[in-house]
Amino acid sequence: MITEKKLLAMPKKSYMNEEQLEFFKVKLVEMRKDIVAHTTAIMSELSEQEHEFDELDIATHQEENRMRLRLLDRERKLLPKIEKSLNMIEDTTYGYCAETGEPIGIPRLLIRPTATLCAEEKNRQEHIEKGYRK
């Protein structure tokens, strides 16, 4: 399998070739597996907690649970994005901006494998959103 270093060194003309698509497929499948295992562990921890009677312990556990649930929610929201990215790999649209059709770029995909917008389009959309919030 190709390494990140070799992936970054590939010429632009080979963008999203079979080797690159396979690299990201493996990366996304591994992400999905890790998230499922982690969410299962969190759910198990939450269901097996002991009941504390000390007010400080109760407050500490409540805060820890709140953080776990927040993380669980973030990971749960990431799973459909991973599935969408895997489907895009199958139909060979992975790695291209959903708005402009331009390449998203290997560096951006290494950081965020579920990205569907190129950096320029993402910045443009964020700029528009900021304008609406004022």
Image (cartoon, grey):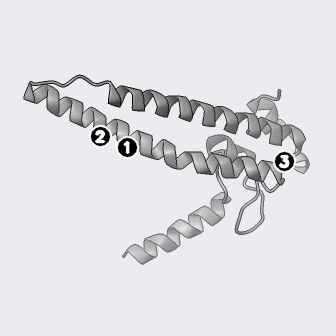
Where does label 1 land, which residue? 70
**Disc 1 and disc 2: Cα gap in Å?**
6 Å
Which of the 4 quarters of the picture holds residue 125?
bottom right
Rendering coords of residue 52 (x, y %): 15, 24
| Point 82% across, 29% down: residue | 2
Which of the 4 quarters of the picture holds residue 91?
bottom right
| Point 41% across, 32% down: residue | 43
Dot 2: element? helix
**Disc 1 and disc 3: Cα gap in Å?**
34 Å
| Point 15% across, 30% down: residue | 58
Dot 1: element? helix
Identify which amino acid the numbered label 3 is placed on: Met
Dot 3: element? loop
Which quadrant would the N terminus be assigned to in this image? top right
**Disc 2 and disc 3: Cα gap in Å?**
40 Å
Tell me if 133 is positioned left or right of 58 in this view. right
Where does label 2 land, which residue? 66
Q: Nearer the viewer, residue 14 or 19?
A: 19
Which quadrant would the C terminus be assigned to in this image? bottom left
Tell me if 10 is positioned left or right of 94 in this view. right
Mark 2 crowdedness (10 Å alpha carbons): few <14, some 14-19, many ≥20: few
Rendering coords of residue 103 (x, y %): 77, 57
Identify which amino acid the numbered label 2 is placed on: Arg
Q: Are the two marked residues, 1 and 3, in contact with CB atoms closer than 8 angstroms?
A: no
Q: Are the two marked residues, 2 and 3, in contact with CB atoms closer than 8 angstroms?
A: no
Q: Nearer the viewer, residue 64 or 101?
A: 64
- Mark toward the start of the polypeptide (1 vs 3): 3
Rendering coords of residue 128 (x, y %): 51, 74
Circle on res. 123: none
Where does label 3 land, which residue? 16
Identify which amino acid the numbered label 1 is placed on: Arg
Identify whether 134 is placed above or below 2. Answer: below
